[in-house]
Amino acid sequence: MENKRSNQPCPLCKLPGRAALFAGEATKCPPNCSNLCCDGTSVVLVLRGVIDPSGASRITTALSALEGVLPRSTFPDSGHVRIRYAPEKITKAKLRNIVRSCGFGITGEQKTFTVEGLNTRALADNVEAAIRKEPGVTTIETVCPASQKAIVVFDPLQTSVQKIAAAIDSTSCRVISP
């Protein structure tokens, strides 16, 4: 069955940064919203070093000029850039090249996994051990039983989201959303 989306205006997409949500104008997007902020794919790139506000502005400007790209945020102090994009219009490789052209190296991608059954410290330790065995995982920022989330930084040239999810699934826990 084909999923048809209308071009219905989304109340949350009217204001930049989904400010309408915080302004109280809407509580959620309609299910058929086809705007990039609702329907795109997300990637978080981890950059080498600390980005100053000028560097963050260069990245945001360069990404904003591309069709099918919506830079969500560039965090100067953390060295992360969060991007929403349309994979049918641009690839992650092209996004990485744009960020590099702004003068920044990329050390990896960050992914947050929602993990069902991750409700004790012992299970979190098991999940963390399974993730560490996956080649290409550079950092595990957290495996948290309270939020049931695992935040992982990895080299996409050495591993993938699917392989990390499979490592988590090899434990008694299961990935709900990668």
Image: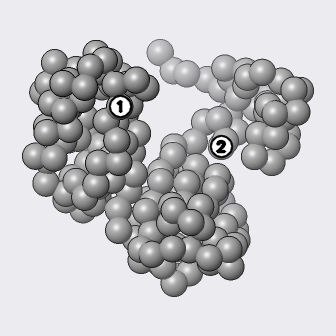
Which quadrant would residue 123 be assigned to in this image? top left
Q: Amino acid at mark 1?
A: Cys
Q: Is residue 132 above or below residue 30?
A: below
Where does label 2 land, which residue? Answer: 36
- Foreground label between 2 and 1: 1
Q: In the image as oriented, which residue stretches furthest toward the front? A: 121
Label 1 neighbour load within 10 Å: few <14, some 14-19, many 20+ = many
**Residue density around tag 2, few if under 14, some if 14–19, many if 20 or more, within 10 Å:** some
Instruction: Quote the CA–CA distance across marks 2 and 1.
Output: 30 Å
Determine if residue 68 is in view: no
Q: Is residue 125 visible?
A: yes
Taking the spot 81% from the left edge, 40% from the top edge, the residue there is: 19
* Relative vertical location of residue 151 with respect to residue 2 in this rendering, above or below: below
Q: Is residue 35 left or right of residue 116?
A: right
> Total label count?
2
- x, y (%) of residue 31? 66, 20
Give the percent coordinates (x, y) of residue 160. 26, 48
Q: Nearer the viewer, residue 23 or 166?
A: 23
Q: What residue is at 80 percent from the left and 48 percent from the top?
A: 16
Between residues 39 and 134, which one lies in front from this camera angle?
134
Of the image marks 2 and 1, the number of the one nearer the N terminus = 2
Q: Which residue is mark 1?
A: 144
Q: Which mark is residue 64?
A: none
Q: Residue at x 57, y 42 (%)?
A: 40
Closest to the observer: 68 or 11?
A: 11
